[in-house]
Image: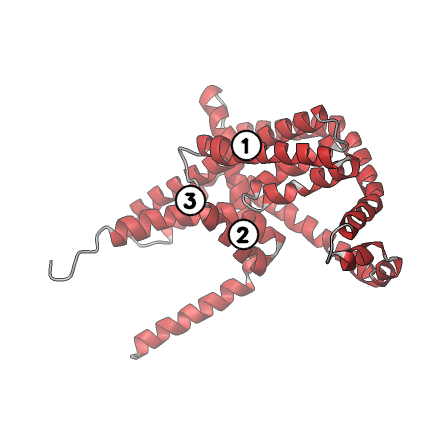
Amino acid sequence: MNSRALLGVLALVVLGLLIWELRWVLLILFGAVVLAVALDVPVTLLRRRLPLNRPAALALVVVTLGLVGWKVSELLLPELVQQANEFTQLVPVLLRRLGELAGQFRGLQNLEELLLDPERWERLQPLGSQLLGVAGSTANTTIQMLLMGLLAVLLALDPRSHQRLLIAACPRFCRPGLERLLHDCRQAVGGWLGGMTISALVVFALTWAGLALLQVPLALLSALVCGLLTFVPTIGPTAASLLPLAVALLISPAKLVQVLILRLLLQNFEAFVLTPLLLRRTVNLLPTVALMAQLSLGALLGLPGVLLALPLVVVLQVICQRVLVEQVMDRWSQPGG
């Protein structure tokens, strides 16, 4: 290995270590970019219909989102708080119910003892006290979210200047291709965010209506969890179904079956009809790719990695298609040909 190759390997190692040390900063920056794209979509639509400059359009969008969020929280938050309190009161009842069901099956008596033995729960109290220490990181998380929001507003306020800065840092011969690539990434992320937002709202509304018709308690809380976890495909809908199923179990096995059928119908409708229809013009991720990305980034970065895994994969999929496939693989001629 000559000195130039060795220097290149060392540079890559140093770059990798630097990226790892700055992973949280880069994660906040990428989250800000995703939020900026989410803001840019309504800003662009608004400027096409009204004679507004970008700062005025962005201010109008932010104020509108704030007012809508305030009104929605004013309508739904009291009921959500009430249902959350009811759920905490139902947890011991649910544990007893699970213990009773486990005792009816051979080989699950140990599970019944674990769920119903008060001494075991008392032993877990120190662990619960330690977990309360996690609340100390709430301030740090709040600061990170505020920084992310501030960066997103600044990026959405003048995206072209940031784009020109990034393009100027590249060699002249690749600037046109990079400009097209950035445009394609923005379109893909914007389309994905718009499609997933509509899908989450539809899932929320249908789940709320279905659980209300089935007269299942905590319908609003369960529907909200199902709608939010729609943004975490593959894992999210399955995990979201646990809450309404647990509440239905407290009523009767027949109600449990009804809720299970409802969630299966909604999950299949969202996965195979609604989401493909909404994302037909943008990047539609394979379930295996989405799951592996969530598992990998979740193991490396925790919950923030899981939440930002899919938009990152959307960007990487566009980059692979435009660079690796079109610029490298499609132009790779056969040796001797």
Q: How is the image coloured?
A: secondary structure
Query: In the rendered view, does 19 fall on the left or right side of 317?
Result: right
Quick one: label 3 or label 2, which is nearer the N terminus? 3
Q: Which mark is residue 294?
A: 2
Q: Quadrant of residue 68?
A: top right
Question: Can the viewer see residue 51?
Answer: yes
Quick one: label 2 or label 1, which is nearer the N terminus? 1
Residue 155 picture location, percent across and down: 51, 42
Residue 233 picture location, percent across and down: 54, 43
Q: Which mark is residue 199?
A: 1
Q: CA distance from mark 1 to mark 3?
A: 30 Å
Which of the two discs, 1 and 3, sits closer to the camera?
A: 1
Residue 75 picture location, percent across and down: 75, 26
Question: Residue 34 versus residue 134: which sits nearer the camera?
Answer: 134
Residue for point 46% across, 40% down: 189
Q: Which mark is residue 211?
A: none
Give the labeled residue for mark 3.
163
Question: Can the viewer see residue 154?
Answer: no
Question: Residue 113 versus residue 161: which sits nearer the camera?
Answer: 113
Which of the two discs, 3 and 2, sits closer to the camera?
A: 2
Query: In the rendered view, does 313 fall on the left or right side of 102?
Result: left
Query: In the rendered view, does 265 fall on the left or right side of 74?
Result: left
Q: Quadrant of residue 228?
A: top right
Amino acid type of the residue that numbered disc 1 sits on in the rendered structure: Ser
Q: Quadrant of residue 244?
A: top right
